[in-house]
Image (cartoon, rainbow, N blue to C red):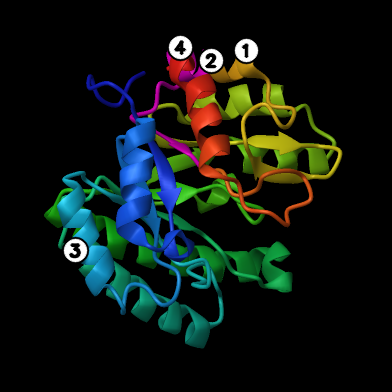
């Protein structure tokens, strides 16, 4: 079921490494991208003057990705409170724009999370963070999305949060546990289609267990991707989240890699 009757927007990720910002945004707009998901990793959002200016100059509505170093599902109160301070700082920055959505991971890095009594504490903290972010989002007019990653489990889908389904993360984790990723993926989409607002798309390699590759450089099943994007989920936003040129993970993908991936993705939506 479509979450909106508006056409799906195609975007790409944007981060501190894309300086100089103006030239890179113009380049991405020239490829055909309709929005950017901006990563707020340090030194953002504190050092934001240039970023704030180029967002407004571009004339597009941005999305944002929370910093990767905040641990909103941590059961340790000191770490959770510190993470909440950073989350609040990010949300105060995000609400200044006509933001599309705010994306985050439910991370904890706690080895004892596998014990129910520890997991329960972490999930309660996560729910506090989600309720806090969703309230700000509703007041400011943007959605809040939980993205699946290595530490993701369905028990973390709490409160009134939407889902960012990262296909590469999902496939690699399914393979790591010896599961059929396509079957698992379709089952997940059957269960949560109405919550999936965003889909992160990139290729992945099971041989090297890496993802965030240009489309066509890995083992993504394009037939399944087309089915998800046109029939099963039909997300409101699709983000090409491509970081690496190849499976060595040593060289960043080029604008040419991104353009070729865009050309492969566009007909599937």
What element does badge 2 sit on?
helix
Question: Against 97, is 115 above or below?
Answer: below
Which of label 1 and label 3 is nearer to you? Answer: 3
Query: Which is more N-terminal, label 3 or label 1?
Result: 3
- Residues drawn in magenta: 227-241
For the C terminus, the quadrant is top left
Outermost residue toward the bottom in this view? 78
Disc 2 crowd rating (10 Å Cα; few below 14, some 14-19, many 20+) is some
Q: Which residue is mark 4?
A: 231
- Is residue 59 found left or right of 47 in the rendered image? left
For the N terminus, the quadrant is top left
Q: Position of residue 92 (x, y in %)?
A: 22, 70
Q: Position of residue 248 (x, y in %)?
A: 79, 50
Residue 226: assigned label: 2
Residue 53: assigned label: 3
Camera-side residue of 107 and 261: 261
Q: In this view of the protein, can residue 160 be seen by the observer?
A: no
What element does badge 4 sit on?
helix
Q: In this view of the protein, can residue 205 be seen by the observer?
A: yes
Camera-side residue of 79 and 239: 239
């Amino acid at each position: 079921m479509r979450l909106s009757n508006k056409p799906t927007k195609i975007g790409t990720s944007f981060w501190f490494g894309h300086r100089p910002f103006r030239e890179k945004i113009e380049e991405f707009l020239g490829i055909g991208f309709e929005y950017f998901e901006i990563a707020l990793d340090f030194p953002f959002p504190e050092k934001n003057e240039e970023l704030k200016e180029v967002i407004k100059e571009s004339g597009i509505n941005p999305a944002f990705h929370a910093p990767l170093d905040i641990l909103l599902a941590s059961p340790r109160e000191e770490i959770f409170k510190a993470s909440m301070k950073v989350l609040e700082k990010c949300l105060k920055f995000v609400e200044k724009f006509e933001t599309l959505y705010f994306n985050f991971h439910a991370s904890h890095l706690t080895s004892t999370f596998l014990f129910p009594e520890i997991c329960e504490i972490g999930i309660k903290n996560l729910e506090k963070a989600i309720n806090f972010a969703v309230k700000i989002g509703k007041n400011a007019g943007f959605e809040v999305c939980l993205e699946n990653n290595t530490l993701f489990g369905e028990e973390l889908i709490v409160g009134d949060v939407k889902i960012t389904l990262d296909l590469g993360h999902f496939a690699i984790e399914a393979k790591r546990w010896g599961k059929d990723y396509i079957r698992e993926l379709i089952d997940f989409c059957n269960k949560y289609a109405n919550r999936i607002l965003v889909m992160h798309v990139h290729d992945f390699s099971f041989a090297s267990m890496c993802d965030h590759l240009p489309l066509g450089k890995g083992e993504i099943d394009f037939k399944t991707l087309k089915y998800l994007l046109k029939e099963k989920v039909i997300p409101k936003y699709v983000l090409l989240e491509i970081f690496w040129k190849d499976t060595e993970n040593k060289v960043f993908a080029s604008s040419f890699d991104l353009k070729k991936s865009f050309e492969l993705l566009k007909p599937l939506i």
